Image (cartoon, rainbow, N blue to C red):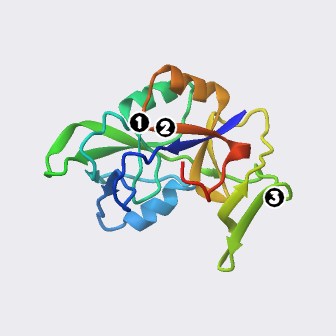
């Protein structure tokens, strides 16, 4: 079985729906696009910093952020390391709301979008005229996964969602990581707030 790894939003009391905002350092938009592909990124001399917009990160294994990057806690990365996941990783230095650097770093993971995993005939979705290859809204997501599909991945058509296989889901739950909800892929709808 496959699940959407969804960050919970119940801790928000306003409409920002962000845990952290990645600071711009000049070519952030280019890096953002590259993190969504399998393109190799040379980060020599780059330092990724993010401002926390919440007080308490202990309950957040994943940070919802302005770049749609999967940014994970050290505990989440420890679970992922047990699954031989070899995606490139980028350290994110976190700053508190009063601009002090925290002693903990989270990690952005470059999970590329994978084509040909979605059954386009069985799935129910809308697109935008300007971007016909990408899903705008998803009402029903039907996947056709090969046996060798990674434990954590993204689909080409909807880069904002991260999917995990059942073995990884179980390991994350066993580790007691917080701030995550798993939605069976066939029940996922982007029109629902989870």
Tell me if label 2 and label 3 are in contact, CB under 8 Å.
Answer: no
User: Could one spot residue 38 in this view of the protein?
Assistant: no
Q: What is the CA distance from the residue labelled 2 to the residue labelled 3?
A: 27 Å
Residue 61: which numbered mark, if any? 1
Residue 161: x, y in percent? 58, 51
Tell me if label 1 and label 2 are in contact, CB under 8 Å.
Answer: yes
Query: Badge 2 local density, few (<14 within 10 Å), some, or many (20+)?
Result: many
Q: Which residue is under mark 2?
A: 180
Dot 3: what SS?
A: loop
Q: Comparing marks 1 and 2, which lies closer to the viewer? A: 2
Residue 121: x, y in percent? 86, 58
The numbered mark, 1 or 3, whose residue comes first in the sequence reads 1
As drawn, is 161 to the left or to the right of 64?
right
Say if 114 sits above or below 32 in the image: above
The numbered mark, 1 or 2, whose residue comes first in the sequence reads 1
Q: What is the CA distance from the residue labelled 1 to the residue labelled 3?
A: 31 Å
As drawn, is 63 to the left or to the right of 146?
left
**Residue that appears at 82% across and 53% down:** 119
Q: Which residue is under mark 3?
A: 120
Query: Which quadrant is home to the N terminus?
Result: top right
């Amino acid at each position: 079985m496959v699940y959407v790894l969804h960050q919970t939003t119940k801790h928000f009391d306003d409409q920002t729906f962000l845990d952290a905002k990645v600071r711009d350092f000049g070519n952030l938009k280019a890096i953002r696009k590259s993190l969504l592909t399998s393109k190799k990124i040379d980060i020599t001399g780059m330092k990724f910093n993010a401002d926390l917009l919440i007080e308490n990160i202990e309950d957040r294994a994943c940070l919802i952020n302005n770049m749609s990057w999967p940014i994970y806690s050290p505990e989440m990365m420890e679970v992922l390391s047990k699954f031989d996941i070899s995606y490139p990783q980028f350290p994110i230095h976190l700053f508190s709301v009063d601009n002090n650097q925290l002693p903990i770093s989270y990690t952005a993971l470059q999970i590329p979008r994978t084509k040909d995993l979605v059954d386009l005939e069985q799935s129910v979705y809308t697109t935008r005229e300007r971007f016909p290859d990408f899903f705008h809204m998803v009402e029903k997501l039907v996947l056709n996964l090969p046996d060798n599909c990674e434990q954590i991945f993204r689909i080409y058509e909807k880069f904002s969602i991260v999917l995990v296989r059942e073995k990884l889901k179980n390991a994350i739950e066993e580790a007691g990581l917080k701030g995550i909800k798993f939605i069976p892929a066939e029940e996922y709808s982007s029109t629902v707030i989870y």
